[in-house]
Image (cartoon, rainbow, N blue to C red):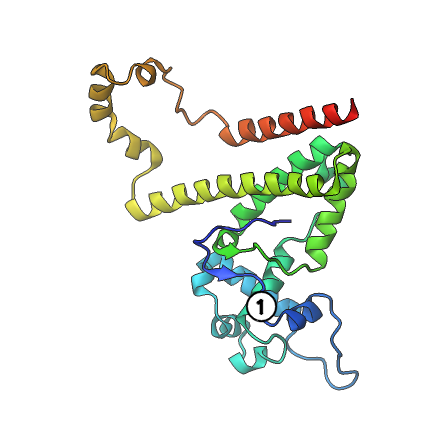
């Protein structure tokens, strides 16, 4: 249930196709032929193939022609089901955001557990589908998956006692935090792929110069930090998430008081 945008660096924008046609496809309100042979293609197959292609090659490798090739059909056959890449992208976004059917996946029923689970699920979603970070979702097309996910979360966090805009803002806050963390992780992986250096090798190459800088006396606070200050064992994502939830806890308590 992602609602954030990847920022100005996004290569695609949700809602860039025919909005009315996209909504019709998402909500399955179009007319269907009642007779004739069963079609070889289906919209579900097209969307699934597009998602798999984007997972493998990123959005740069996504095109109607490539999707058609994956399905072993002609490009023109796809246009009978979806008008173009803009509409297809919105169908893909809604597809990957399908919420879990297991209520336990959103925690124990409390608002904090629900937001905590939402954050972890969203981070996992970006890891499974890194191309999501290439999409500007500041104006999302709301399909059934997005609304189903929002309904489940809102049901669990309503007891916080905040106003409706504040509840929505809490979700946006969590999503924005996760997007930033996911982007950082993706950039680290991309840097390693492009340079051929692991993270450890990259920092080790800087050690001789950094040791001289610390010994110069110019950076006394930095020099006094423990050896594990920048270690990889510390879970920065978890630390930040818990502090956000702690802050919301204080606000909820104040409202109830």
Q: Judge left or right: residue 253 versus residue 238.
A: right
Measured from the top left, where is residue 253 in percent x and y?
A: 74, 23
Seen at 59% across and 61% down, the residue is 92
Q: Judge left or right: residue 1 versus residue 12.
A: right
Residue position marked by numbered label 1 in the rendering: 88
Seen at 68% across and 67% down, the residue is 23
Between 180 and 131, the one nearer to me in the picture: 180
Measured from the top left, where is residue 224 in percent x and y?
A: 34, 13
Q: Is residue 20 above or below residue 110?
A: below
Q: Judge left or right: residue 208 versus residue 190.
A: left
What crowding class fits label 1: few (fewer than 14 Cα within 10 Å), some (14-19), or many (20 or more)? many
Seen at 34% across and 47% down, the residue is 193
Between 149 and 80, the one nearer to me in the picture: 149
Between 255 and 139, the one nearer to me in the picture: 255
Residue furthest out toward the bottom: 36
Q: Is residue 94 above or below residue 33?
A: above
Q: Judge left or right: residue 213 versus residue 42.
A: left
Q: Secondary structure at mark 1?
A: helix
Measured from the top left, where is residue 180 in percent x and y?
A: 49, 41
Q: Is residue 54 above or below residue 207?
A: below
**Residue 74 appears in view:** no
Measured from the top left, where is residue 62 in percent x and y?
A: 48, 66
Q: Quadrant of residue 113?
A: top right
Seen at 76% across and 32% down, the residue is 160
Between 153 and 68, the one nearer to me in the picture: 153
């Amino acid at each position: 249930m992602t609602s954030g945008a990847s920022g100005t660096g996004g290569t695609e924008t949700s809602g860039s196709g025919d909005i009315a046609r996209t909504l019709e496809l998402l909500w399955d309100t179009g007319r269907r032929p009642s007779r004739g042979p069963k079609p070889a293609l289906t919209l579900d197959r097209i969307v699934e193939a597009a998602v798999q292609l984007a997972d493998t090659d990123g959005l740069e490798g996504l095109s109607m022609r490539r999707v058609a090739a994956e399905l072993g059909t002609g490009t023109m056959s796809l246009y009978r089901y979806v008008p173009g890449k803009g509409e297809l992208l919105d169908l893909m976004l809604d597809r990957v955001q399908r919420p879990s059917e297991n209520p336990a996946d959103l925690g124990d029923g409390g608002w904090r557990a629900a937001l905590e689970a939402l954050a972890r699920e969203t981070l996992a979603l970006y890891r499974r589908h890194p191309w999501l970070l290439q999409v500007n979702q500041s104006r999302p097309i709301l399909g059934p998956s997005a609304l189903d996910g929002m309904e489940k979360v809102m049901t669990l966090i309503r007891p916080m006692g905040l106003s409706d805009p504040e509840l929505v803002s809490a979700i946006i806050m969590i999503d924005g935090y996760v997007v930033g963390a996911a982007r950082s992780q993706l950039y680290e992986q991309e840097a390693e792929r492009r340079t051929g250096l692991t993270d450890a090798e990259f920092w080790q190459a800087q050690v001789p110069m950094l040791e001289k800088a610390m010994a110069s006396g110019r950076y006394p606070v930095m020099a006094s930090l423990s050896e594990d200050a920048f270690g990889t064992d510390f879970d920065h994502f978890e630390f930040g998430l818990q502090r956000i939830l702690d802050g919301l806890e204080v606000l909820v308590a104040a409202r109830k008081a």
